[in-house]
Amino acid sequence: MSQYDGLSKSQLVALLEKHDRTKKLGLVWERDEILADNAIDENFVAATLDVDLSDKPAPWRNLVIEGDNFDSLRWLRMTYAGQIKCIYVDPPYNTGNKDWVYNDRYFDADDRYRFSTWLEFLHRRFTLARDLLTEDGVILISINDENRALLELMLEEALPGMRVGSFTWRSRTGGNEGGDHFFSTNHEHVLVYGMKKFQFSGTEKTFEKYKDYDPIKKDYFRGDNFTQPKDRTERENGYYAINDPKTEIYYPPNPNRVWLSPLPKGQDKLLEGIVWKSFPTWPLPRDVVRPKKLKDRIAKWVDEGRILFPEDQVVKVWNSLEELLLDIDLGNVPKVKGVNKIFRDMPNLEFWVGKKVGFKTPEWKRYKSDLKNPTQPISSWVTPKSEAKSLPKNTDTAANFISGTTQEGSSEVTKIFSDKVFNYPKPTSLLKSILKQVSFSGDIILDFFAGTATTAHAVMELNAEDKSSRRFIMASSTEVTEDAPDKNICRDITAERIRLLNKSDDKKFEELAADFAYLKTREIPFEAFDDELSPQEVWTALEALHGLPLTEFETGASWNEHAIDSQVIIYADDINKHLITHIKKHVDARSNLFVYSWAPGQIEIEFPKRDFEVRSVRDTLIRRFQQ
């Protein structure tokens, strides 16, 4: 029996079209595309609130979601699409170990297709995760050296055009065994995939080099490099002598790094036969007539004082070519990193005879107000805590992206639980450094391989440090197996870590606590949607898709309402005159009102001319779920 038997015509056409679009260069793995597509909308996913496992009083701003993270992501795509600023995950590395239920269920070390199974498992989840991001959102994925290449190629399919780069961090110290090739792999990577508007915050700049003050411009300035990484053969129009009109000192260019600013267009023709392709000079010779439209930027900058000419330097005049050649051979000419700026076979060597030549290099006068950004880009190398003290201080190149090792992560978990409950957890310091770079107050951070909830811990510490209000969503499975039917990683480790932190007596952070709602995902056949979806599950979904903190549904009430300054949502389980009167009060107050009902037509009849939205529960949830 063929694998295509039983497929409809539209499914076969869709499959052929996908095959036609398949790239010829890239990663290919065994997958059933029809099955993968159908799995997303195979059934509806509801999230059931467990008040007893939630922590702190409602409303709950943060979430812990128990269930297969594929189902969690399907529910989140319905409720939080376009709302997540940062997604960080530490997925299974496909090493064949039995530490994760995912390995037991999906990966067999002896299976020839185990890499394809692993890739397909992750591809489905990252495809869903992509839809959750804000316009400036980012996904960060931890991975080891062994599977980094495969993962990156797969992510090019799941997250096309989103690759930003990667961080490398020291995951452990020691490890001197070196393996078969005496090569230590004491590091891991964090891959970065961002939306078009995503940017890192960068590291803080210091301004101690801006010591001099310009009273005319009323700004501080510093001398900066005025060259570019192109040699004289690559940028002929950047290879010329600069003249200080006040001192009549000439400065030769660096043959390996020409001046940053090229000569104006047309000047090569203007000076042809005089000094061009040898050394054009500034200012232009007096006997040369400038075209009116010629923009001599260097002359303009010299006049404006933007070129800083050196003081207290060696200045030399060669009265003959023989005298100049002798000093070239002796090395008594201007140099840069051991390279002569004036050399024997340079064109028009006679140009330098009889002129005052400066041995230092002019600089660009950079004002503090010229800075495009208050911060500088961060490095892809994460500094280990053990080396943090060796970093240069108070310089523009000082890094502040510092992380501990997995040993720190293990110690943190053991301290909280008084036991080793998880293998190789990431250190909180790594997650804090990352989240500090990519998130701000009010942003939502998601981890759908939450494990020990290190991501939530990092969010809590950051909020306490900078008095902000980031929110977290932690999704984790139970990892139930036949041998451990009562196992529940999400309840007993993920959520428990947050609970223990909430109860902690550690005075390091005064406001470390974070409330959370505990949700459990369950699948509902679409044909049973109307009958099986509970009012609490409806209410939880509606609050979430409006970006509101979650509350417990008030059973027995005609309607439930959640009102904040910017909006009001009402879920009407029973439409009666009291509800209509209540809605009229919101209309009179010109509230930003959304009313949901299983039978919205009754409300629409009462308000034929309305400036608020009336929505069907069924249509809204199913449409958003199948988007």
Image (spheres, helix red, strand yellow):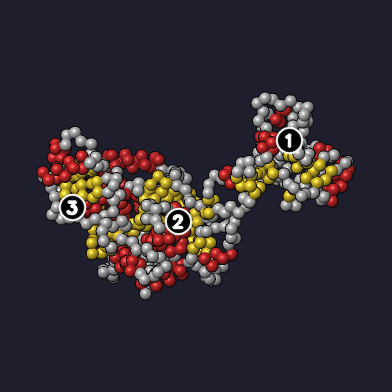
Q: As drawn, is 275 to the left or to the right of 409?
A: right
The residue shown at (19%, 51%) is 560
Determine which residue is flagged by label 2. Answer: 436
Amino acid at pointer 1: Trp
Q: Residue 457 is drawn in which quadrant? A: bottom left
Image location of residue 501, percent across then percent down: 35, 67
Disc 1 crowd rating (10 Å Cα; few below 14, some 14-19, many 20+) is: some
Element under label 2? helix
Q: CA distance from mark 3 to mark 2?
A: 38 Å
Q: Residue 424 is drawn in which quadrant? A: bottom left
Looking at the rendered structure, which numbered label has been put on residue 282?
1
Q: Is residue 175 above or below residue 563?
A: below
Amino acid at pointer 3: Pro
The residue shown at (28%, 70%) is 483
Q: Residue 105 or 477: which is nearer the viewer?
A: 477
Amino acid at pointer 2: Lys
Looking at the rendered structure, which numbered label has been put on residue 535?
3
Q: Marks 1 and 2: CB-CB under 8 Å? A: no
Which one is in front in this view, the residue at disc 3 or the one at disc 2?
Answer: 2
Q: Is residue 392 above or below residue 158?
A: below
Q: CA distance from mark 1 to mark 2?
A: 48 Å
Q: As drawn, is 18 to the left or to the right of 295?
A: left
